Each structure stands twice: as C-alpha cells, then as structure tokens.
Image (spheres, grey):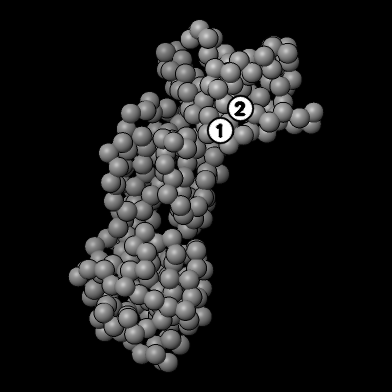
Amino acid sequence: MKKMDRFLLMTCFARAVELGSLSAAGRDLGLSQPNVSRYVAALEEHLQIRLLHRSTRKLSLTQEGERYYAEVRVILDAVKESESAARANVEPSGLLRVACPTTLAHSFVLPHVPEFLGLYREVALDLQINDRYVNLVEEGFELAVRIGHLDDTTLRARRIGQFERVCVASEQYIASRGCPEKPEDLRDHDCVLYTLLLLGGSWRFRTGDVPVSGRIRVSSPEAAREMVLAGLGIGYGPQWLFEAGLKDGSLRLILRDHVPPPVPINILYAANRLMPARVRVFMDFIAQKFLLLPAFNR
C-alpha cells in the first residue's frame, strides 16, 4: 500500500465506526458504499487484523478495532489541528478523550462539563470515569487526571491541586471500640478497605505504612465513606471525601498528628505527542476550576 493512500483508508474506517455503517460513511465522504467497503478491507489486509464485524444490520468493532480506532482518531484529529493552525484558525475542535478517577470526576469535574462544552462548541468530550490505571498511549487517551506522584518518564504532568489523606471514624464506632492513639493501634481495629487503593492493604502515615484489616472491603470511595458513616470501621482517604460528615459531627478526625504529606493531583499527557488546542484549553479550564476549590488548596 502506498503511504499516500493510508490517510484515506483510515478516514473511511473512522467514519464508518462513528456513523455506524459503510453506506453512511460513503455519503459523508462523497464515496460509494462499495468503495468504502473496499478501502476498509484494504486497511485490514495491510494491518493483517480484522477491525470490524460486519452484518446486514450493523457494524461492530473487534477488540483490535477498538484499540486501532482510538489511535486513528488521535492521528486524524492531529492532522485537522495542524491544518487549522496553518490557516491561523486555532479554534479547538475534535474528540478529546480524558480518564478521571470516579470521585474526582463526579464531585469536581462533571459539574463543569456543561460550561466547558458551551465555551468550545466544536469539541466533543469522551470522559472515561473509573479508578483503574489507564495507559494513555496504548489506550488512546490524550489526558488523564491522576492522584499521586508521576513515575512514568513518557508522560508530563501539570499540577492542579493537592490534598491530605486523613483517618476518620464515626462517633458510634469510637463509642464502641475506642479511638486509636497511634497508627500501629489500627491493627486492633476494624478498618474499611478500599480495594483499588494503590497501597493495597496498608495505609500511609508520616512514619511509614501500616498494615490494616477489616470485615468490609469496597471498590469505590463513596461506598467506603458510607460504611464508615454506618459505624462499620475506621476510614482512610482524602479529607474532602469525608467533609460533610466532619462538618455535621457524625465523623471525627483521628490520628491527626500522623497524617502523611499532601498528595498531588495532576493532569497527565504524553510527552512526545502534538498537543491540539482542545487539550490545551481543557487543561487550562480544569486547572482554573481546581484553583478555586478550598479542598485542593489548603
């Protein structure tokens, strides 16, 4: 295949995925349906993988096709951004894929999405909300909001805030089990464990990590907070997660003199990729919103 043809093949594949059919992609691109089908087949032959499952009703991506589509979308959007810049037209546009932890997304990012999309009407946002580790390069994301220190040399980080991790317990729990005076005392207490915490079965304090255990394990920070409020154990996490309970007196800060240093919140992006205008404006927008939040600027 000639290199000059590859852009056309990738464009046909991407539009077929986005519009749901080869005929719709043909109408969009001014091509016949047989030509679009032939171009997608040529791309599959070149790559030696199947990208699409075809049926009389609809198209669906194979697992390899999902991965390749994410990469192709980045390439096509980068070309569009480059052409816009060459014409001195830098209006942000295209699909922006962002990964964000669950609680941060629901509490501090999603509330601002309507304003962002209202400001940048040519940008489409694909916000993936989960607490798993996302590989930006391999999974086709342009940005990731991430908690913790950066340890990947292929990425760059922009600091947008920081917070303290704290220990809390309900008044009900303290009344029945007592209050630990030092981190090591947690070994004799029930702790509510968040299973996706990078530290695993240990909690970090100023003097080091302490193994903890308990009768309840959950896979979301919000569930951990609810179990702590229910008196099922001691909780550990960002202070803003427990803020409502601390304000109304249902929760109490414990081990206050032993908290570890603040944890950074960063927006990560690939070090060796072209940064489209949509990426820059989203980073600036979110950084400004986080700057105004007391929870991240104590």
* Closest to the observer, 89 or 143: 143
Q: Is residue 115 left or right of residue 59?
A: left
Instruction: Name the residue: 27% across, 60% down.
Output: 262
* Closest to the observer, 252 or 118: 252
Disc 1/disc 2 C-alpha distance (Å): 7 Å
Q: Is residue 21 left or right of residue 1?
A: right
Instruction: Name the residue: 52% across, 45% down.
Output: 128
Outermost residue on the right side: it is 56
Q: Which one is earlier in the sequence, the residue at label 1 or at label 2?
A: 2
Q: Amino acid at mark 1?
A: Glu
Quarter where residue 185 is shown: bottom left
What kind of element bears circle 1? helix
What numbered label is drawn on residue 64?
1
Image coordinates of residue 101 in percent, x first then y, are: 45, 53
Image coordinates of residue 89 in percent, x first then y, are: 46, 18
The residue beneath circle 2 is: 50
Say if mark 1 contacts mark 2, CB within 8 Å. yes
Q: Amino acid at mark 2?
A: Arg
